[in-house]
Structures are given as structure tokens and as C-alpha cells.
Amino acid sequence: MPKLIQPLSDIQVKNAKPKAKDYRLTDGGGLYLFCHTSGGKLWRLDYIFAGRRKTLALGSYPTISLSGARQRREDAKKLLANGVDPSAVKKAQKAAVVTDTENSFEVVAREWHNKFSESWSSSHTATTLRRLHSDVFPVMGDRPIGEIKAPEVLAMLRRIESRGALETAHRVRTICSQIFRYAVATGRAAQDPTGNLKGALPAYKQGHHPAITDPKEVAPLLRAIDGFHGSFVVKCALQLAPLFFVRPGELRQAEWVEIDFEAEQWNIPAERMKMKQPHIVPLSHQSIAILMELHVLTGRGRYLFPCHRSISRPMSNNAINAALRRMGYDKDTMTGHGFRAMARTILDEVLQVRPDYIEHQLAHAVKDPNGRAYNRTAHLAERRKMMQEWSNYLCSLKNGAVVLPFKQVDVA
């Protein structure tokens, strides 16, 4: 007569101690607790499938309780009754989890970022990753990208909007859309759910970069810069900003190795330019004079405008704007970026320079009649003449020339 198996009790399972050899505590129906010499307690289920004896791991105690193990045994029996191998199901589920992890939003987003950031500016690369880290990954970074729906994305965007950062919410939506489209292209998502969010966020009106473009107001600004009482390095940067009218990041990261005094030009490498194309800034006589004076102080280092805390780093990206605030120009009146709009407006409307010369010098994407991008030396002779004429004009303003007001233009 076969021996009857008494079901286990919670006390038996809890009090099971390690012995010199591994042993089992049987519960019945193929379920048992495997007690290891190390003290580990593992639930196992022995069963027969297709004539073969097999064992299914059901988890460890106390993570899986006695009642939990019995429920898993019953689930396995249902599968067997339907001709399904429980071990095969578990293996498939594990593979699905691995696939979901490999195709999570964060994994795909980092792959996208690594692939395309080589063509971005360093600041855009860092800003994009920072926004993903701060606002997106904590909310849906571990979600399989193919399972994310529009309402889930909208909930994340509304969190950003709720803190008063509507512009950031719109920018994050754009970033997510690019990531979803990449996932679609690489076969990891069926569609971009952000396409269904049109109109779901309040519209954000892109403002102008605050800039002074009226020549009457430019004159006192230039005089205020010459009278700046802060750091000499920052003062030189302020003096050169209107003469060069490059983007603030391009100015503050300028290196002495890029300054060619003999050729009278500043050669900015492609990796620091927004459009990833090398750029030439012709040096006027006025800018050379400022650079020569600055060279005495910082010329032995790497940067024209080193950080005051460490010469191994360029000055802060807020240094120019902070100096403008000290001079009495608030953030709604003038910014470091505003010198570009100042030059674009006045060169066009006062000095009547050809627009394509101006656009080239602003390092905007300008194409020839055949649709090809001009190289960095396009119209260089005319741009040299323009830059000297521009410097002369600014000097005349500073010295009290009669001028007329003109409208504001935003320049990226």
C-alpha cells in the first residue's frame, strides 16, 4: 500500500533547517521544498510531459509562500491538462521579459541619442540627454517602447507643464517623437504615439531672443560695455560679441589656436558649430586690437575667455548675460544671443549689405541655386569687407553718429 503524503504546514516550512546534506520536504502533487545545505529553500515541481520526467522551479521561500507555491502548482497542472509544457511557458515568458528590457524606451532612446548626437552641437547633445533623464526616463524609461500609448506620453508631458515649463514640455514631445520614429524604423514599435497629441498641450509661442536693434539704443550699450567694471576677460568678450555676432557658445569656447592673426581670421572648427560646418570669422582692425590686448592676459592658456575658477575651462555660459544685467540690461531687453539680431538688422537695413553675405557670416544654412550648401570660404572677400564696415559703423555709433531706429529681427 503506497505511503500517504501529508501536506506541509507553514510551521514546517518556516522551521526547516539546513542539514549536512540537501533534502526535500514534500507537499504532494509533485510539489516539494528543496532545502540546501547553505540554508536556501527552493520550491520545485516534478511532473511528466510527453513521457519525460521534468522539474519546474517555482521560486524561493520566503519570497514565495507555501500557499503561493501551491497556486503555482495548480497553474502548472492546468497547462498540462491542455497539453502545454509549463517549463516551455516559463522559458517564453522569461524571453519576453528580456526582449521588453532590451526594447525599453530608455534603451532605444540612448541608442538613438548615441547614433545621432555626433551631428549635434555639444550643448544640444547635453540638453537633450538631461531632459530625458529628468522628465522622461523616471516615468516611462523601463516601459517596452512598443507598448507606450498616447495617454501615457501626455501624462508625462503634463507633469512638465504643471511646473510652468510649457516650452520644455513641447521640446520633450519633439524629442520623444524622434525616438518613437526611430523605434518604428528599427522594428521595435508600430507607430509614433505622439502624433495623436496634436492640440493636447496649450500652444507655446516662441519668443524672440531679446535684442537691441535700434541704432539709437545700440550706441549707449556699446559705451556701457567699454565702461564695464567687472572682469577684464568678460569685458573683452562683451566688446567682441557685437563685432563677431557668433552664437554665445561659439564665443565663450573660442581657443587661441583658432585665431590666425596673420590671416586676420578666426577659424571655428565644425564640431563647435550648430550646423556642424567649419566657419570663418574675418577679424576687423578693431577686433584684432582687442584680441592683442586680451592675449597678454590669457594667451598662454587654451581659451580666450577662461573660467575665473579654472583656466582649463571656458567661462560660464551665463557670464555675458550676467554682465549685461550688471550693466542694467534685463533679460527682456538684451542677451548675448541678441548681438546676432542686432547685426542682422542693421547690416541689412542700415548698411544695406547683401542678405546672403549676412546669412553666411551668421553661419546659417545657405544653399546655391543647385541646392548645395556653400562652403566656409564662400564670399569671404565680401564678408571681410562687411565685417570691417560693421566694426567701423559700431565705432561711429559709439562716438555719437546720428542714427535712425529700425525694427527688431530674431536670429537663431
Image (cartoon, rainbow, N blue to C red):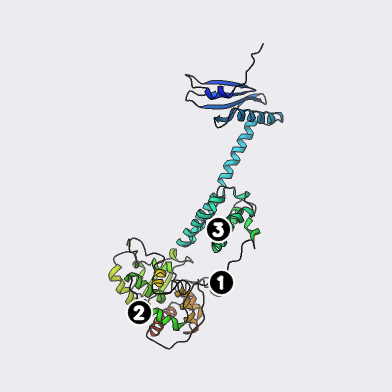
Q: CA distance from mark 1 to mark 2?
A: 36 Å
Which of discs 1 and 2 lies nearer the camera? The answer is 2
Q: Is residue 385 visible?
A: no
Q: What separation in Å lies between label 2 and label 3 (alpha carbons)?
A: 46 Å
Q: Which residue is mark 1?
A: 371
The residue depicted at 58 percent of the width and 24 percent of the height is 10
Q: Earlier in the sequence, mark 1 or mark 2?
A: 2
Residue drawn at the location 35% of the way across and 73% of the way down? 235
Q: Amino acid at mark 3?
A: Ile
Residue 317 point in image, percent of width and height: 41, 65
Up-down relation of residue 234 to residue 52 (above or below)? below
- Name the N-terminal-most of marks 2 and 3: 3
Q: What residue is pinned by disc 3?
A: 160
Q: Secondary structure at mark 3?
A: helix
Q: Position of residue 340 (x, y in %)?
A: 46, 74
Q: State the residue in front, 278 or 203.
A: 203
**Circle 3 Cα neighbour tier, 10 Å, few/some/many (<14 / 14–19 / ≥20):** many
Query: Tag on residue 19?
Result: none
Where residue 123 sits in the image (x, y, percent)? 46, 62
Residue position for label 2: 286
CA gap between label 1 and label 3 equals 40 Å
Q: Is residue 75 left or right of residue 118?
A: right
Do the CB atoms of the residues marked 1 and 2 lie less than 8 Å apart?
Answer: no
Q: Amino acid at mark 2?
A: Gln
161 left or right of 255 in image: right
